[in-house]
């Protein structure tokens, strides 16, 4: 069932100026007429107002808010106050409301105090109804009576028109919740039956995109137990007929219940065993639990809206902007996206702004270009109200989403040459990270017959580093819209993405070419680490062989030879030709002594302009040994953006943020030659 609404009673004379509070009688449980649109029938609803029936946990927790017209979707701006006390006594629900002291609500509070704003409504949801069929009612009313015997209040609202017998206030929540419907046994003849509400499995709620009107709330399954026996004793043929009818009713209900819950194999045994409907229901629940447990636990079916028409329109307009700015955009081969964007291809930014205003219910006819831009960017709410807009424009969301997508796409295509030979990681925050470099394990010990296994230990050496943060702000002003400036969606994101990728390369290659110290107090490349050439030399088969030999001889923390082999040859532009020559399978030696060993062709050449002169490096794959580790902030791998309505500028501000860090973890997987 969706949440429902009812009228409440404001008592203006109870206003307390000292603490800005006022008392309300928010329910008396009075009967009210509702209508089930899905079964085309009216019904009366009555609330049982007792401490046992009303769940006051939200009042006790202090989270029952006072809302403007049930506008839950309006966010915190729609909050007028909070219920600080609530009580159920003598068939009434009372509460003390503390009103907000925000300056913008001063007029509202004054009207409440004066009794001008006095209509109150509250939202509640019911978890159990007792249903009296129309035929069983003794008050002469010919509609079913739904008596809520377990329900919970959610919020209290000041409204323009409260719930009455002919209408019900619309409430914002759209999703339903479980509710049990129990039809009370008739007092007269059990042969008279009232049409029941739909059984489980049929659609009983309004679609998610329909208004959740309390008057359109449809009741789900009605569980109709076997008719109760008559109050007076029966005899003769009447008693036999009645017993037969009760047995048939019991058998039919048990059969239907078992079939509904996909446990039809239980029905015959439950009927022959003389089980009551309640006993059969317990058996069905036990069988469902057993089946769910055997298949890994119960899985609820949830229908989720992946996208709607508004989202598709926003994406299509964003794609049209990108295609105007860059006709060779990466998604141009996606026929579906291009087709959706085609309807906006003849529009400039001003036309798209006008489209967003009209989509929000406004009328931009007769307005200047500046006024249209200001309204579309949500910079003048008064102007929007005068134009008839029923909501804010989504144009800022379209622009921000377009910049974000363009920025991320541009970042992804930037050349980052270190990703193959360095290891990627993440850090949870900006505090210093200690990366433990694990060497080879201690030697295995021989186990004698019946002997005991010994604990294996690992040598450890910790390298520490922390993340850094870089960023800037891009402003999309209303002048951008008027001037139809597409640079913000093409050239600016590309420049920002290139800058982010350049920062990463500067940090990683700065470690490779710099003189920073490791945790042992020695530079990354040092004779003490046995990873630097004794004599500088250009790239040849002999110098490559020397580097390979040095890496194979590296010794771990436990003293064991690691036998590492290089996978990458890292050079600058001045060495690119030599590197490609000595790693090419097509290399032909001028004489036998110049023959290039086949293992050199397995090296992958990495060229980066940050490596100056003839210096070259060898690196093992990070899958075998730690080299340089680079890290992003956990959950923000790459370039991220945040958006806010501009304060310093008249428009939208998009902040680009990049968090990155790197550190050499182990020298054993890298080798340096100064070149010649």
Image (cartoon, rainbow, N blue to C red):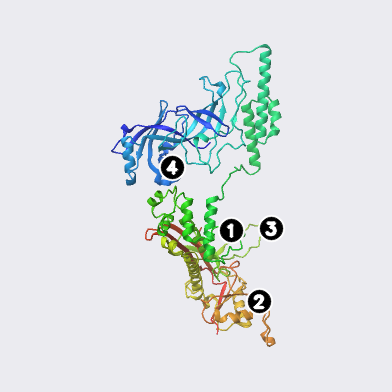
**Residue at numbered disc 3:** 449
Where is residue 126? Give x, y as percent.
50, 33
Where is residue 184? Give x, y as percent.
56, 24
* Quarter where residue 179 is shown: top right
Q: Nearer the viewer, mark 2 or mark 4?
A: 4
Compute the Cα span from label 1 to label 4.
35 Å
The quadrant of the picture occupied by the C terminus is bottom right
Q: Nearer the viewer, mark 3 or mark 4?
A: 4
Q: Nearer the viewer, residue 133 or 343?
A: 343
Please say if the residues under marks 3 and 2 sit with CB atoms less than 8 Å apart.
no
Going from N to C along the chain, the mark reached first, 3 or 4, is 4
Please say if the residues under marks 2 and 4 sit with CB atoms less than 8 Å apart.
no
Mark 2: give few (<14), some (14-19) or many (20+) Cα within 10 Å: some
Compute the Cα span from label 1 to label 2.
43 Å
Mark 4: give few (<14), some (14-19) or many (20+) Cα within 10 Å: some
Compute the Cα span from label 3 to label 2.
49 Å
Compute the Cα span from label 2 to label 4.
69 Å
Please say if the residues under marks 1 and 4 sit with CB atoms less than 8 Å apart.
no
Q: Is residue 620 visible?
A: yes
- Residue lying farthest to the bottom in this orientation: 591
Going from N to C along the chain, the mark reached first, 3 or 1, is 1
**Residue at numbered disc 4:** 71
Q: Nearer the viewer, mark 1 or mark 4?
A: 1
Mark 3: give few (<14), some (14-19) or many (20+) Cα within 10 Å: few
Mark 1: give few (<14), some (14-19) or many (20+) Cα within 10 Å: some
Going from N to C along the chain, the mark reached first, 3 or 2, is 3
**Residue at numbered disc 2:** 601
Q: Nearer the viewer, residue 508 or 94?
A: 94
**Residue at numbered disc 1:** 337
**Left or right placement of residue 59 versus residue 528 in this view:** left
């Amino acid at each position: 069932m969706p949440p429902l609404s009812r009228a409440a009673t404001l008592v203006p004379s109870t206003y307390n100026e000292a603490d800005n509070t006022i008392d309300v009688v928010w329910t008396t449980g009075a009967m009210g007429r509702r209508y089930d649109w899905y079964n085309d029938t009216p019904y009366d609803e009555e609330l049982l107002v007792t401490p046992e029936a009303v769940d006051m946990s939200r009042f006790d927790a202090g989270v029952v808010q006072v809302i403007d017209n049930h506008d839950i979707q309006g966010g915190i701006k729609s909050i007028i106050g909070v219920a600080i006390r609530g009580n159920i006594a003598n068939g009434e629900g009372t509460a003390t409301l503390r009103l907000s002291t925000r300056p913008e609500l001063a007029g509202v509070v004054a009207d409440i105090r004066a009794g001008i704003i006095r209509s109150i409504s509250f939202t509640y949801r019911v978890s159990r109804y007792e249903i009296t069929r129309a035929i069983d009612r003794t008050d002469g009313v010919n509609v079913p009576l739904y008596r809520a015997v377990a329900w919970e209040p959610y919020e209290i609202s000041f409204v323009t028109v409260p719930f009455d017998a002919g209408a019900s206030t619309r409430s914002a929540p759209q999703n339903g919740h479980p509710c049990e419907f129990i039809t009370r046994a008739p007092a007269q003849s059990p042969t008279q039956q009232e049409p029941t509400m739909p059984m489980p499995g049929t659609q009983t709620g309004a679609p998610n995109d329909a208004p959740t009107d309390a008057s359109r709330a449809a009741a789900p399954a009605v569980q109709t137990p076997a008719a109760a026996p008559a109050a007076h004793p029966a005899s003769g043929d009447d008693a036999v007929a009645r017993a037969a009818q009760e047995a048939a009713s019991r058998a039919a209900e048990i059969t239907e219940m078992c079939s509904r819950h996909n446990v039809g194999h239980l029905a015959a045994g439950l009927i022959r065993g003389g089980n009551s409907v309640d006993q059969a229901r317990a058996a069905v629940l036990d069988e469902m639990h057993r089946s769910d447990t055997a298949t890994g636990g119960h899985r609820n079916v949830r229908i989720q809206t992946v996208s709607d028409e508004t989202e598709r329109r926003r994406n299509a307009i964003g794609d049209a902007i990108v295609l105007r700015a860059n006709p060779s955009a990466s998604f141009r081969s996606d026929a579906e996206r291009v087709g959706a964007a085609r309807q906006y291809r003849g529009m400039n930014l001003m036309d798209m702004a006008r489209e967003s205003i009209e989509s929000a219910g406004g009328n931009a006819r007769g307005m200047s270009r500046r006024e249209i831009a200001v309204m579309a960017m949500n910079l003048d709410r008064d102007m929007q109200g005068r134009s008839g807009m029923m909501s804010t424009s989504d144009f800022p969301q379209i622009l921000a989403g377009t910049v974000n997508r363009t920025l991320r796409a541009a970042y992804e295509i930037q050349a980052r040459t270190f990703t193959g030979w360095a290891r990627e990681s993440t850090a949870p925050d900006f505090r210093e990270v200690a990366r433990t470099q694990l060497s080879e394990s201690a030697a295995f010990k021989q186990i004698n017959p019946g002997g005991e296994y010994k604990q294996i230990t690992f040598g450890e050496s910790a390298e520490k580093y922390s993340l850094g943060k870089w960023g800037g702000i891009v402003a999309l002003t209303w002048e951008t819209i008027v001037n139809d400036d597409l640079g913000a969606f093409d050239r600016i994101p590309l420049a920002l993405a290139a800058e982010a990728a350049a920062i990463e390369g500067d940090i990683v290659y700065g470690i490779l070419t710099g003189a920073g110290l490791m945790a042992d107090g020695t530079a990354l490349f040092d004779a003490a680490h046995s990873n630097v050439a004794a004599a500088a030399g250009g790239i040849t088969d002999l110098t490559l062989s020397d580097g390979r030999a040095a890496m194979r001889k590296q010794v771990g923390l436990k003293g064991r030879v690691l036998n590492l082999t290089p996978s990458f040859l890292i050079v600058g532009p001045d060495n690119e030709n030599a590197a490609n020559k000595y790693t090419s399978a097509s290399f032909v030696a001028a004489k036998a002594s110049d023959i290039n060993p086949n293992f050199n062709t397995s090296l992958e050449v990495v060229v980066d302009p940050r490596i100056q002169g003839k210096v070259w490096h060898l690196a093992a794959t990070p899958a075998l040994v730690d080299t340089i580790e680079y890290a992003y902030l956990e959950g923000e791998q790459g370039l991220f953006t945040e958006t806010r309505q501009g304060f310093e500028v008249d428009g939208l501000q998009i902040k680009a943020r990049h968090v990155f860090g790197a550190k050499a973890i182990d020298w054993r997987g890298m080798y340096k030659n100064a070149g010649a």
